[in-house]
Image (tube, rainbow, N blue to C red):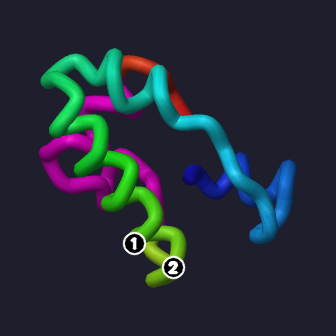
Amino acid sequence: MSPASLADYGNDVILNAGTGIMDHPDGPAAGVGAFFEAIERVQGGESFSWETLPPGSLRRALEKWGF
């Protein structure tokens, strides 16, 4: 869940993440990893900026779909 999604919908929301998981450029397992990494970053108050985003599943997802 990206910061933009939280800003639009708040914390009490369920988002359908099927396409984000199944169409991840590195496969569904990487899609699941990206989803959980995003949740951890939001909960930890971490930035989603390119400068702070480490290489990995979340970065690859954001390269494909953006913020």
Q: Would you say 1 lies left or right of 15 here?
A: left
Q: Is residue 62 magenta?
A: yes
Q: Would you say 19 lies left or right of 58 here?
A: right
Q: Which residue is mark 2?
A: 43
| Amino acid, disc 1 | Glu
Give the class, few, some or many, for how many residues have Cα within 10 Å of label 1's Cα (few <14, many ≥20).
few
Image marks 2 and 1: residues in contact by CB distance under 8 Å: yes
Quadrant where the C terminus is found in the figure: top right
Residue at x 39%, y 72% (from the top left corner):
40
Asked if 35 appears above or below 61 in the picture, the reply is below
Please provide the residue range marked out in magenta: 47-63
| Amino acid, disc 2 | Gln
Query: Looking at this view, is 53 or 16 the one in front?
Result: 16
Please state the horizontal and vertical placement of residue 2, each as a whole percent of the image.
58, 51
SS under mark 2: helix
Point out which mark residue 23 bears: none
Q: Which residue is mark 1?
A: 40
Pick out the residue farthest to the bottom: 44
Residue at x 24%, y 50% (from the top left corner):
33
